[in-house]
Amino acid sequence: MNDEPEGLRPWLPAVRTGCPVGVPHQVWIEASMTWFVHEFGRGPAMRGVVVPGPELRSAAYSGTPEQIEGLVALVCEWMGIDRSTLTVELFDRSDEDAAAAREEKRTVGHYRVENGRPVIGLDVTEASDASYLIAVIAHELCHVRLLGEGRITADRKDHEWLTDLLTVYFGFGVFTTNAALRYGETSRGFSVQPLGYLDERTLNAARNDSYSRLGYLTEREFGYAMACYAWLRHDTEPDWAAELDPGPRVFLRQGLAYLTRNAGPGEFPTRRAGNIPVSVRVVPKTDHVWLSGLYLMPTQTEWPPDAPGHRPR
């Protein structure tokens, strides 16, 4: 019998212990998470993590307007939003105009304020994919919590990235992170279609398949954000990690290994580094009418040049 510890077996991959993102992004993610704690309290982070249940994958779900409404109501309840105060518009952008088609950019969700009432729009083209739709709903409802409640304005150039990050803090990170990678059927069979900047793209480069991304944070950034979220919860071995796709799961584990080596429980490394400025710019509250949207884009979205650095478990 071999009594050698499993961690020493040479064929098992070692978990890297460096931070999976660069210093500017690390500072931004950690400072933003800290700001969320101050702004929303620890409650949203300490509740259960929302993960896909079997009913979302069942044949009974087909993306009907009634079912979409049910998903919106559930996400609203989880995020502490009164559904009756919100207008939801469903639209189909599968046949956008030729100019948009040439740009390969398709709106899948948007947020605005109309006559003082928040309005979110949802593209129903792929509404039959419940998990994907929940990712879009969560993003748009985080606009309601940030923009609609006057916590920031759209003048803040990183507000879309902050909105992506807030989905993690409110427990929907499994959905928004996994939305970065989806599988589609092409004339050549099944192909990988990343909707985020994914390492898997390199593995499939020979296929020469087109690819697009959903949202603003990359897979690597989502992975570290999920690690910071778990760290705030004092959860160094989250069971919900199994719900993440393999790519971001690697970055989650790497992020947790890094935090374990470099920070105290519930703290972040850059909060203790005197040579790294840590701040989150918050603009004054105003009465502006904001417009925000979530897009499917063909390549990685760059950060703004002046930006800083249904089953709960």
Image: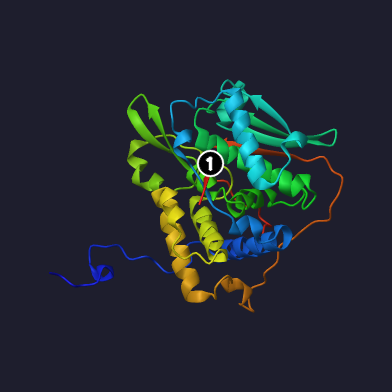
24 up-or-down from 246: above or below? below
Q: Is residue 303 left or right of residue 258?
A: right
> Which residue is found at the position 56% from the left and 41% from the top?
135
Count of labels shown? 1
Relative to 281, 271 lies left or right:
left
Indicate the secondary structure of the residue bearing disc 1: loop
Task: Please identify the quarter of the rendering in which residue 192 is found.
Answer: top left
User: At 61% across and 24% down in the image, what residue appears?
Assistant: 65
- Image x and y of residue 210, in percent: 44, 34
| Spot occupied by residue 272 in the image (x, y as percentages of width and height) | 61, 77
- Residue 280 position, x and y percent, is 71, 62
Query: What coloring was used for the rendering?
Result: rainbow
- Seen from the viewer's position, the closer of residues 33 and 101 is 33
Q: Is residue 40 left or right of residue 253?
A: right
Does 281 sit above or below residue 166? below
How would you rate the neighbour count of disc 1 (Cα within 10 Å): few for under 14, some for 14-19, many for 20 or more?
Answer: some
Residue 283 in which image quadrant: bottom right
- Taking the spot 20% from the left edge, 72% from the top edge, the residue there is 4
The residue that appears at 57% across and 73% down in the rendered structure is 269
Q: Is residue 277 above or below residue 200?
A: below
Disc 1: which residue: 310
Nearer to me, 186 or 61: 61
Position of residue 31 measured from the top left corner of the image (x, y, whole percent): 65, 65
**Quadrant position of the N terminus in the picture:** bottom left
Three-letter amino acid code at disc 1? His
Q: Is residue 107 visible?
A: no
